[in-house]
Amino acid sequence: MPADRTAAPAGPGPCADPADPAIPTGPAATAAGAGGPARARTDVAVIGAGILGVLTAREILARDPGATVTVLDRDMTGSGATRRSAGLHFPRGANETVRTLAAESQRFYEDLRTARPDLPIHPLGMTVLAPEQAEDRLREVYLPEAKLRWTAELPPRVPALPAGFGAWEGDGCQYADVHDLTQRLAAGLRPAVAFREGVEVTGLAAGPGGTRLTLSGGATLDAGHVVLAPGPWLAAPAWRELVAPLGARVKKIVALHVELPPAPGDRAVVLHTEDAFLLPLHHRGHWLFSYTCQEWDAEPDTVAPALTAGHLREARALLTRYAPALAAHCRSGRVFCDAYGPDGAPVVTPLDPYGRLVFAGAAGGSGYRLAPALASRAADLIPSLPSPRKATT
């Protein structure tokens, strides 16, 4: 991460005195006055109950089991981008920052799967298709853990390659049912974490002693620190002005469902040049084809969930180059959006001069793949937490 996005801010710990005059006063403080909802306190509030928000709460408790943590979401846990995620993890990154995050996240998921083999995390073979002259670049982009190696054997669904292309096999690939995984991890946290679903944060006011959250229904919540993990909801009124200077943008993400059942040995197929992939979703009984849709500045509340004729046309044209038999079975899919950092890397940074409010996200469609490392970075910016230790399950 750039230096200005990783340095832990100095300042008092999260357990500020509720009477501290530094905590905001005024309308936000009086909303829960006589006859109104009771005002509550928490050491850390996490806004957003997707995979990143839930893993952030888990990381905070792993470092300090005595911390009070509240996770808030205007929808249900695991909704939004998490609900629609392809859930593919492969060990690669377009730049050094993303490669570092991907390596940390890979170790986390390997340890998690060893400790909890019941979780819906599924190891998968991987084949990368790219121009032969791109081999040096592939070895820069993919982590050593991928152990990329040339192969003359094409995936069964790919009958032939374009002229000048080659295939490489790789290790370290897996996919998850991210919605199910998030729900299960949240269930394990509930004895120690307060989840407030269907509760919208309508106001944020940070001061040197903490942050006051105004909630739908008129309640308020005082938090020592806040981690904002909003996914593509960058423009929510409560934090629009705080997030705007980050320069993050929102783009549509489109994936087609290929209505053919995968065979037990089918592998993920990565189209390197096109930044697209074919994923056998064994747990759902069909394939998924994700391609790069160039529709920017989308609004998550207004994005239609249905595929357009243009999406189908673009995706089928690309897939036909590699797997024409699969392209004929693309009739449905999923459409949503995600936030992208301005330099191609996620963003984890304080949003206020007191270091009380931290943003984590803009993972560019790799929220599941990078979430463990981003959660750790967010916890690093809460100065009252002890040094990191190995998370327990």
Image: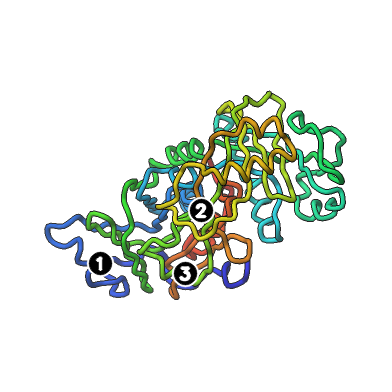
Q: CA distance from mark 1 to mark 2?
A: 31 Å
Rendered location of residue 215, percent (x, y) = 28, 57
Q: Out of 79 and 192, give the one closest to the viewer.
A: 79
Tell me which corner region of the image, top left, top right, bottom left or bottom right, holds residue 266. top right
Q: Residues within 10 Å of mark 1 (few under 14, many from 20)?
A: many
Q: Out of 286 and 146, give the one closest to the viewer.
A: 286
Residue at point 66%, 51% (across, down): 102
- Name the residue type under label 3: Ala
Name the secondary structure under disc 1: helix
Name the secondary structure under disc 3: helix
**Residue 244, numbered label:** 3
Q: Out of 215 and 389, give the one closest to the viewer.
A: 215
Q: CA distance from mark 3 to mark 2?
A: 31 Å
Where is the N terminus found, in terms of image quarters?
Answer: bottom right
**Residue 63, numbered label:** 2
Q: Residues within 10 Å of mark 3 (few under 14, many from 20)?
A: few
